[in-house]
Image: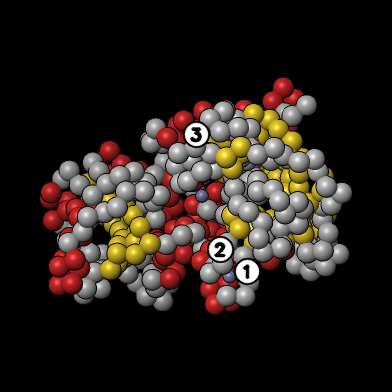
Amino acid sequence: MKGVNHELPAPLDSEYKTEAWGIPKDGEKHEPLWIARPKATGKLVNFETLYSGVCHSDLHTGLNHWGPCNFPFVGGHELLGKVVEVGSEVTKFKKGDIVGVGCFIDSCRGCENCEEGSEQYCLKGMTGTYNSAKVHGRTGGNQATFTAGGYSASHSVHEDYVIKIPDGADLERTAPLMCAGITMYSPLNYWGATKEKKMTVGIIGIGGLGTMGIKLAKILNNDVIAISQDKSKEKLALGKGADKYVAMTDPASIEACVGQCDLILNTVSAKHDLNVYIPLLKKGKGILCQLGGVGEPHPISQVVLMFNRFSIVGSLIGGIKETQECIDLCVKNNIYPDIKMCEAKDISSVWENLENGNSEAIRFVIDVKKSLENKDHCPK
Ligand SMILES: [Zn+2]
Ligand SMILES: [Zn+2]
């Protein structure tokens, strides 16, 4: 699949220019570039970016895996920043506040999903933090350009799409919660694996998402079964709090957990066979929830689903209210993803690492301030 190259227009009077790192044209590597951001008017909250997580979705988008991407492309939908200025109508934030922005920055706000706080399922389509057309009118700036993500020095976002970061948060490690954290929290919350009701939760894939899922499911008082291909992640998974470990290459470990899971969160993002995990579900109620960006269809026997009342479902990030709950919960309980800091000059090599499987189960986070000190790798 090929992307679409656009010419970036000069900033409007309602905009200013800020440093960013992105892919100028389809197929090119990351480079420093200037992009336009809206000034802090109306309900917009302007902040300087401190940290920006690097998510696998960034490269799926920028490499046209999910459809033609719009270039120049600036990735990053795990932003952590400090408020510099607020528009005259902003009521929720003030200068100096620490804020986060996740995977979307606008939605219609009128449909039933927006009204119940599931903006990510907006019936008219959420406006993604990057590579999205500006259609709902709250993004500010030039409406003819596409949204640009967090690999940049600053941003202005409508206050209803900004998350308040509580005092005491570990800021570097809070950034990836904006996508990785909420991706795991939302299905636990929606399918009832919360403190009131103890469940047995399976987590497939012990990478960046999976380890976060183990920590969240445990803090919400569930029993957790970590599930991976082989035994290589056993120590890691148990160290993160998993109660049991299933290696798909070890029949005895599967046998020990057959029929136990109320809910399984599947984070695998490469092509795989779902049928091997079905026996782990609890008869009459087991739910298998898909969270990875796999494009290929899965062959499944519906007879197995019928005779066991199994459900196979999907989930995508979470709404704004839910994201705030997730951040508050994580900060209060001191649970964060494992991260490795990097700079903007490293983005291309970080993407390569993610493409090659990220064996270390860590989330890369760009130190934006430090990146800006490297004048050789800033736009001229
Ligand atoms: Zn993401
Ligand atoms: Zn909506």
Q: Label 2's element?
A: loop
Q: Depth check: 47 or 11 in front? A: 11
Asked whether the beta carbons under mark 3 and mark 1 sit within 8 Å of each other, the answer is no
Q: Is residue 297 left or right of residue 131?
A: left
Residue labelled with disc 2: 125
As drawn, the label of residue 108 is 1
Q: Is any part of residue 181 visible from this angle?
A: yes
Q: Label 1's element?
A: loop
For residue 189, what is the image quadrant? bottom left
Q: Earlier along the polypeptide chain: callout 3 or callout 2?
A: 2
Label 1 CB sits under 8 Å from any ligand 2 atom: yes
Residue 179 vs 365, above or below: the answer is: below
Disc 2 marks which amino acid?
A: Gly
Q: Residues within 10 Å of mark 1 (few under 14, many from 20)?
A: many
Percent x, y of residue 154? 74, 45
Disc 1 marks which amino acid?
A: Cys
Q: Nearer the viewer, mark 3 or mark 2?
A: 2
Label 2 CB sits under 8 Å from any ligand 2 atom: yes
Disc 3 marks which amino acid?
A: Trp
